């Protein structure tokens, strides 16, 4: 009977790795997500600068760096009868807008970066729907698509979700949008943020974007993306 008591007491500390003292005070616990071990150096929040018809100048981003931007989409909607240019000034085929036929009728905001190394680009985008808005607007749909830019700073290719042909960040409900995708070193990319539904030129959606760059894990691209407080 004594032996049973001893065995039972020993199980209180099982599994052993969960109770073994660590030599590093900041080591992760066994059940902690890998992102808890990542420390991203975030920039100070800055307001989006309207650039007219397309992406602005690229800002460099290195591994374990993050950019915080705030802005506001003014007007949402999609005009299926509108004709959009499909050739860049460098004579490359354009990937914007991300659907056809038609184009956005409201505001399009851009965040443009150039990667210093190969890694995973993580986006966490929060949009706010005003309290005094219509019931239809509560179901607003937003695109936050990632594009590769050409030498003329125009979007000529878009990133798609792994194993699909769906543009990453496309057709998302307003509120909170998160994605992660691998990007090669020395690549200029831009996130195009726009709302396509409902058709409401008076609707305004404030947004806050956290864009970070972290090391990649092939099996789980988003594993090291930092958690962002909403």
Image (cartoon, grey):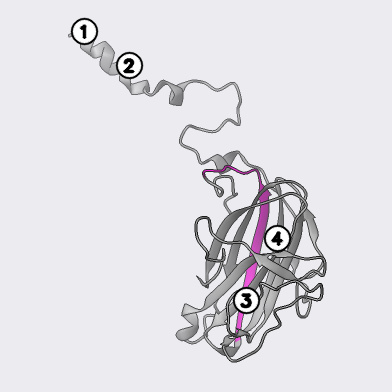
Q: Position of residue 216 (x, y in %)?
A: 62, 44
- Residue 10 tag number: 2
* CA–CA distance in space, label 3 to label 4: 18 Å
Q: Earlier in the sequence, mark 3 or mark 1?
A: 1
Q: Earlier in the sequence, mark 4 or mark 1?
A: 1
What segment is highlighted magenta in the picture?
Answer: 203-219
Query: Which residue was labeled with disc 4?
Result: 68
Whether pointer 2 and pointer 4 mark residues with C-beta atoms closer than 8 Å, the reply is no
Note whether 75 is above or below 125 in the view shown.
below
Whether pointer 4 and pointer 1 mark residues with C-beta atoms closer than 8 Å, the reply is no
Q: Position of residue 104 (x, y in %)?
A: 62, 83
Query: Which residue was labeled with disc 1?
Result: 2
Say whether residue 140 is left or right of residue 5: right
- Residue 194 tag number: 3
Q: Earlier in the sequence, mark 3 or mark 4?
A: 4
Quadrant hosting residue 73: bottom right
Residue found 60% across the figure and 49% down from its top: 226
Tell us which disc is closer to us: 2 or 3.
3
Tell us which disc is closer to us: 3 or 4.
3
């Amino acid at each position: 009977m004594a032996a049973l008591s001893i065995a039972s007491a020993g199980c209180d500390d099982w599994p052993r790795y969960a109770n073994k003292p660590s030599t590093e005070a900041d080591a992760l616990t066994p059940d902690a997500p890998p992102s808890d071990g990542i420390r991203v150096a975030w920039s100070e929040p800055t307001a989006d600068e309207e650039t007219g018809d397309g992406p602005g100048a690229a800002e460099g981003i290195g591994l374990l760096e993050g950019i915080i931007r705030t802005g506001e989409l003014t007007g949402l909607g999609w005009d299926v009868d509108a004709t959009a240019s499909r050739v860049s000034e460098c004579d490359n085929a354009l990937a914007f807008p991300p659907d056809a036929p038609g184009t956005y009728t409201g505001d399009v905001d851009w965040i443009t970066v150039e990667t210093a190394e190969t890694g995973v680009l993580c986006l966490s985008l929060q949009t706010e729907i005003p309290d005094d808005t219509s019931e239809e607007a509560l179901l607003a749909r937003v695109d936050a698509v990632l594009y590769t830019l050409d030498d003329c700073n125009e979007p000529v290719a878009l990133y798609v979700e792994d194993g699909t042909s769906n543009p990453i960040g496309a057709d998302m409900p307003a509120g909170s949008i998160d994605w992660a995708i691998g990007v090669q070193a020395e690549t200029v990319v831009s996130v195009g943020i726009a709302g396509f539904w409902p058709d409401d030129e008076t609707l305004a959606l404030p947004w806050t974007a956290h864009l970070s760059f972290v090391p990649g894990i092939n099996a789980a691209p988003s594993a090291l993306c930092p958690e962002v407080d909403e």
